[in-house]
Image (tube, rainbow, N blue to C red):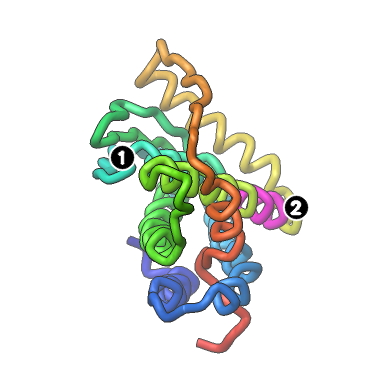
């Protein structure tokens, strides 16, 4: 993992966010600066590598996500990865999910950092959310995780867009980098099949989305 001072700050803040005592209001106070910090790090690394690609090469890694709700957690990983300009191939989606990630080293690092923390925050959110009496617990929790994932995807995508817009020349550099990642994925898996949409019966999507809107993504305006 990188020894970047910015990422060191992010890790400390994520540790605070993972504390069960952190209230939704406190998490919401972390949110705006959180996404901004992690997005700025990604753009900074991309621009540095623009002059020397060896500084941030394209790589890959296989991640195993365990039950319960492995498929839904894998969906969260995929959403984080795509928002942070990585590519995702689902190798197995049963009780255990295996995901092959492709991306530049700095982006893969960002994905790992955020996903690990978001899993903890999602677990806390599920633990304190009451399942309605009319709903099946497993169905409710799956739909909650889908809503959580949708909110995280939207927030990260917007943060990445804003960070790129603020750095002159960044958008063209990022397009070139994404093409390199696509090429690595396509060389490894030349015959990919796109997954169809899921159908979920649970009623937890709205509450999961609300939790995702307040989840901490790694930064705060508070002193550290």
Residue shown at 43% from the left, 51% from the top: 111
Q: Residue under circle 2?
A: 165
State yes or no: residue 101 in magenta: no
Viewer-proximal residue among 200 and 102: 200
Dot 1 surroundings within 10 Å: few (below 14), some, or many (20 or more)?
A: few
Q: Residue furthest top?
A: 191
Dot 2 surroundings within 10 Å: few (below 14), some, or many (20 or more)?
A: few
Residue 118 at x, y percent in the picture:
43, 58
Viewer-proximal residue among 83 and 144: 144
Q: Residue under circle 1?
A: 61
Q: Secondary structure at mark 2?
A: helix
Residue 12 at x, y percent in the picture:
41, 77
Residue 92 at x, y percent in the picture:
29, 27
Viewer-proximal residue among 59 and 91: 91
| Residue stretch rendered in magenta on the structure | 156-163
Residue shown at 60% from the left, 77% from the top: 25
Residue 108 at x, y percent in the picture:
41, 48
Viewer-proximal residue among 205 and 169: 205
Q: Magenta span: helix, strand or loop, mainly?
A: helix
State yes or no: residue 157 in magenta: yes
Q: Compute the Cα span from label 2 to label 1.
A: 29 Å
């Amino acid at each position: 993992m990188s020894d970047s001072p910015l990422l060191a700050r992010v890790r400390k803040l994520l540790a605070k966010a993972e504390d069960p005592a952190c209230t939704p209001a406190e998490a919401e106070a972390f949110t705006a600066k959180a996404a901004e910090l992690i997005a700025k790090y990604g753009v900074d690394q991309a621009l540095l590598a623009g002059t020397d690609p060896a500084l941030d090469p394209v790589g890959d890694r296989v991640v195993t996500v365990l039950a319960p709700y492995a498929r839904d957690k894998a969906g969260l990983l995929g959403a984080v990865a795509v928002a942070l300009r990585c590519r995702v191939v689902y190798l197995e989606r049963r009780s255990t999910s295996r995901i092959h990630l492709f991306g530049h080293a700095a982006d893969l690092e960002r994905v790992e950092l955020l996903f690990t923390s978001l899993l903890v925050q999602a677990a806390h959110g599920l633990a304190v959310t009451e399942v309605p009496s009319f709903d099946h617990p497993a169905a409710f929790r799956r739909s909650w995780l889908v809503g959580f994932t949708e909110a995280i995807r939207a927030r990260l995508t917007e943060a990445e867009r804003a960070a790129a817009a603020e750095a002159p020349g960044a958008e063209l550099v990022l397009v070139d980098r994404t093409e390199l990642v696509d090429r690595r994925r396509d060389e490894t898996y030349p015959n990919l099949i796109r997954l169809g949409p899921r159908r979920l019966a649970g009623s937890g999507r709205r509450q999961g989305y609300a939790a995702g809107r307040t989840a901490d993504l790694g930064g705060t305006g508070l002193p550290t």
